[in-house]
Image: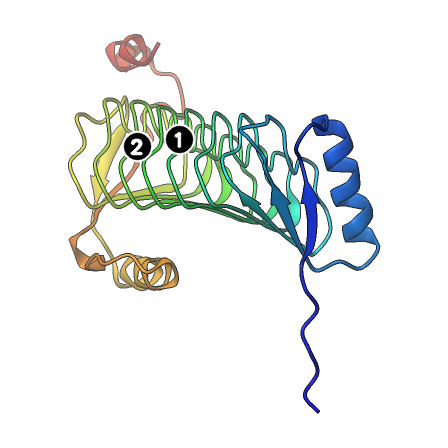
Amino acid sequence: MAAVAARPLEIDCAGRPTREINREIRRAASGGATEILLLNPAGRHNLCVALFESVTVRLLGDAGWYCAGMLDGGTVVVDGNCGWGVAENAMSGRVEVHGNVGTGAGATMRGGELYVAGDTGSRAAISLKGGAVVVGGSVGYMSGFMMQRGSLVVCGDAGEALGDSMYEGTIYIAGEAASLGADAVDAELADDDVEFLRAELERHGVDREPSSFRKIVAGRKLWNFSKKEFEVWKTAL
């Protein structure tokens, strides 16, 4: 007889404090659970933070602020919307949000991947230090601000000051940007960029032609201060 797949472990969040829920998630993961369903998350803040095990946690509903912060392994899937700071400071692993998220999506991420099916608020991928933030919809103003590494992929539009003061990393956008930020410049879309985009779009089922994306990188004028280019610095500050 064929082996019967184990049913996911269910954790009901109703009437319980967040700290208790997170402790139960970590206990279950360290005990060998591979899939956990969170019932009635009801927009609680700080769910699934500091998750280090190779486990998939699926939230059946909305999450509040800082969901999956400091993630270092495993997968967190939100079947709903998220508040501010989803996947903030993630080191590795994967976060999927099948709705919209607030400001600061993927802030200071160092690795792993964040996928948002809908739109994000302002400052998506702010101070990104690695990994990839992929947004199926649009992002708000100052997204990609002070990026240092990694990739931000925007399948829709962007608000003002996209890529402001970025140092390294790459932004790809399929729609329109209201404006580019200080020292953010266009670059040629190379073959390896197209292949990267193709893989990301296919993985998430996004119907966009990779070659239609615009590539934005740092102009590198802000890398070193020069009094000859003081106006550039004055604008950035």
Q: Tell me: 107 left or right of 118.
A: right
Q: Quadrant of the C terminus?
A: top left
Amino acid residing under circle 1: Ala
Residue at image point 26% right, 46% down: 155
Q: Tell me: 50 left or right of 108.
A: right
Nearer-the-camera pick, 208 or 184: 208
Q: How is the image coloured?
A: rainbow
Q: Which mark is residue 167?
A: none
SS assignment at label 2: loop
Is 181 drawn above or below residue 228 in the view shown? below
Residue at image point 34% right, 15% down: 226
For mark 1, does the 10 Å Cα neighbourhood hold few (<14), some (14 to 19), or many (20 or more) residues?
Answer: many
For mark 2, does the 10 Å Cα neighbourhood hold few (<14), some (14 to 19), or many (20 or more) residues?
Answer: many
Amino acid residing under circle 2: Val
The spot of residue 130 in percent (x, y) is 51, 43
Nearer-the-camera pick, 160 or 84: 84
- Label pair 1/2, CB-CB below 8 angstroms: yes
The spot of residue 11 in percent (x, y) is 70, 44
SS assignment at label 1: loop
Nearer-the-camera pick, 169 or 36: 36
Is 77 drawn above or below residue 50 in the view shown? below
The spot of residue 76 in percent (x, y) is 57, 47
Query: Quick one: label 1 or label 2, which is nearer the N terminus?
Result: 1
The residue singled out by tag 2 in the image is 139
The residue singled out by tag 1 in the image is 124
Nearer-the-camera pick, 181 or 206: 206
